[in-house]
Image (cartoon, rainbow, N blue to C red):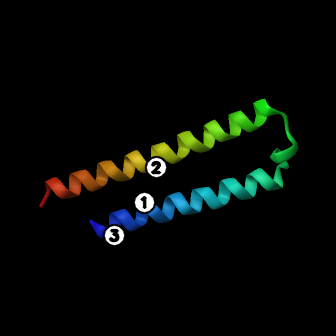
Amino acid sequence: MRGLLLRMVLWVVAMDAIAIAIYYLADLAHADARARGVFTLAWSVATIVVVLTALRRIRLARKGR
């Protein structure tokens, strides 16, 4: 179960690193507010999907004890 939690944390850190890289490489800091909003929404939704999927796996692993 700790392995699943660690994997979730690593996925979130990796996704954040990729998103931050895209943000700066695409020069979104100077983009209009709508573009930044869409990017932030997509980043948030992707993070939520990863976390909820990982938490579901952790819950199933706990039930299987």
Q: Residues within 10 Å of mark 2 (few under 14, many from 20)?
A: some
Give yes or no for contact between labels 1 and 2 (Cβ–Cβ under 8 Å).
Answer: yes
Mark found first going from the N terminus, 3 or 1: 3
**Residue on which the image places disc 2:** 50
Q: Is residue 11 above or below residue 50?
A: below
User: In the picture, which quadrant includes the N terminus?
Assistant: bottom left
Picture coordinates of residue 26 (x, y %)?
Answer: 82, 49
Residue at 85%, 39% in the rendered image? 31
- Tell me which amino acid carries mark 2: Val
Asked which secondary structure carries label 1, the reply is: helix
**Residue on which the image places disc 3:** 3
Q: Quadrant of residue 16?
A: bottom right
Q: CA distance from mark 3 to mark 1?
A: 9 Å
Q: Residue furthest left?
A: 65
Q: CA distance from mark 1 to mark 2?
A: 7 Å
Q: Residues within 10 Å of mark 1 (few under 14, many from 20)?
A: many
User: In the picture, which quadrant includes the C terminus?
Assistant: bottom left
Mark found first going from the N terminus, 2 or 3: 3
Q: Quadrant of residue 37?
A: top right
Q: How many marks?
A: 3
Picture coordinates of residue 7 (x, y %)?
Answer: 42, 65
Q: Is residue 44 above or below residue 60?
A: above
Q: Residue furthest top?
A: 34
Residue 62 or residue 40, whichever sits in front: 40
Q: Is residue 20 left or right of residue 12?
A: right
Q: CA distance from mark 2 to mark 3?
A: 15 Å
Picture coordinates of residue 55 (x, y %)?
Answer: 33, 51
- Tell me which amino acid carries mark 3: Gly
**Residue 8: assigned label:** 1
Residue at 30%, 69% in the rendered image? 2
